[in-house]
């Protein structure tokens, strides 16, 4: 934008655009760990810097690591991202940055450390129940055979 003097001379007034970088995203959490992935969620920042947020950048650091590294190949349009390709048993922390036309925010607060590990949950419980059911059925079948053999002894006399 330019202003002109009464004589028609162009005056430089600098950038009158009032946009700035957004604040960092809020309430960043890491959840639903598996041996190879962890889901990171967040909320939009209170201040978008005066223009729409174009997307988010997710970063990770390994326990005892010395620097964060970007894990999203492009901007994430929503409020969650599944980080894949993790090392089983390794602990990670995550943080998120917001980006608008004016630039990239400072990073959010880091998540609590979370381990990439399969949960001992429903899937393993279902496998155990199936094993237990098969084992009990096999035992019951063997017991029925023994009862039948014993009862034949009684009925043969």
Image (spheres, rainbow, N blue to C red):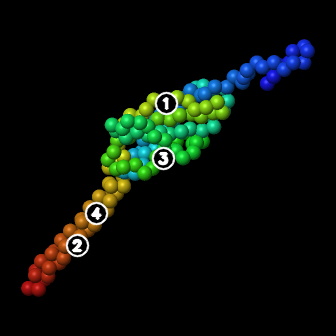
Q: Position of residue 99 (x, y in %)?
A: 59, 34
Residue drawn at x 73%, y 20% as measured from the top left: 14
Name the residue carrying label 3: 82
Q: Label 1: how many residues lie within 10 Å, few (<14), some (14-19) or many (20+)? A: many
Q: Label 2: how many residues lie within 10 Å, few (<14), some (14-19) or many (20+)? A: few
Mark in the foreground, 2 or 3: 3
SS for callout 2: helix
Mark in the foreground, 3 or 4: 3
- Viewer-proximal residue, 1 or 143? 1
Q: Position of residue 82 (x, y in %)?
A: 48, 46
Name the residue carrying label 2: 141
Examine the rendering and report whether any part of residue 67 can be seen: yes
Q: Is residue 140 left or right of residue 3?
A: left
- Sequence-wise, the earlier of marks 1 and 4 is 1
Measure how far apart labels 3 and 4 are at the Cα level. 32 Å
- Viewer-proximal residue, 128 or 6? 6
Mark in the foreground, 2 or 4: 4
Q: Position of residue 131 (x, y in %)?
A: 28, 63
Q: Position of residue 76 (x, y in %)?
A: 57, 42
Q: In the rendering, which numbered label is found on residue 58?
A: none
Name the residue carrying label 1: 108
Q: Label 3: how many residues lie within 10 Å, few (<14), some (14-19) or many (20+)? A: some
Mark in the foreground, 1 or 2: 1
Measure how far apart labels 1 and 3 are at the Cα level. 17 Å
SS for callout 3: strand
């Amino acid at each position: 934008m330019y202003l002109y003097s009464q004589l028609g001379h162009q005056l430089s007034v600098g950038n009158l655009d009032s946009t700035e970088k957004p604040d960092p995203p809020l309430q960043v959490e890491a959840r639903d760990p598996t041996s190879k992935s962890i889901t990171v969620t967040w909320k939009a920042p209170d201040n978008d810097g005066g223009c729409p947020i174009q997307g988010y950048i997710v970063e990770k650091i390994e326990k005892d690591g010395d620097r964060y590294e970007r894990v999203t190949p492009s901007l994430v349009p929503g409020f969650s991202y599944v980080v894949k390709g993790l090392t089983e048993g390794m602990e990670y922390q995550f943080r998120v940055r917001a980006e608008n036309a004016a630039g990239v925010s400072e990073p959010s607060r880091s998540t609590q450390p979370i381990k990439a590990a399969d949960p001992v949950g429903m899937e393993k419980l279902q496998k155990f129940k199936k094993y237990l059911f098969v084992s009990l059925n096999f035992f019951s079948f063997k017991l029925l055979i023994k009862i039948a053999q014993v009862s034949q002894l009684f009925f043969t006399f």
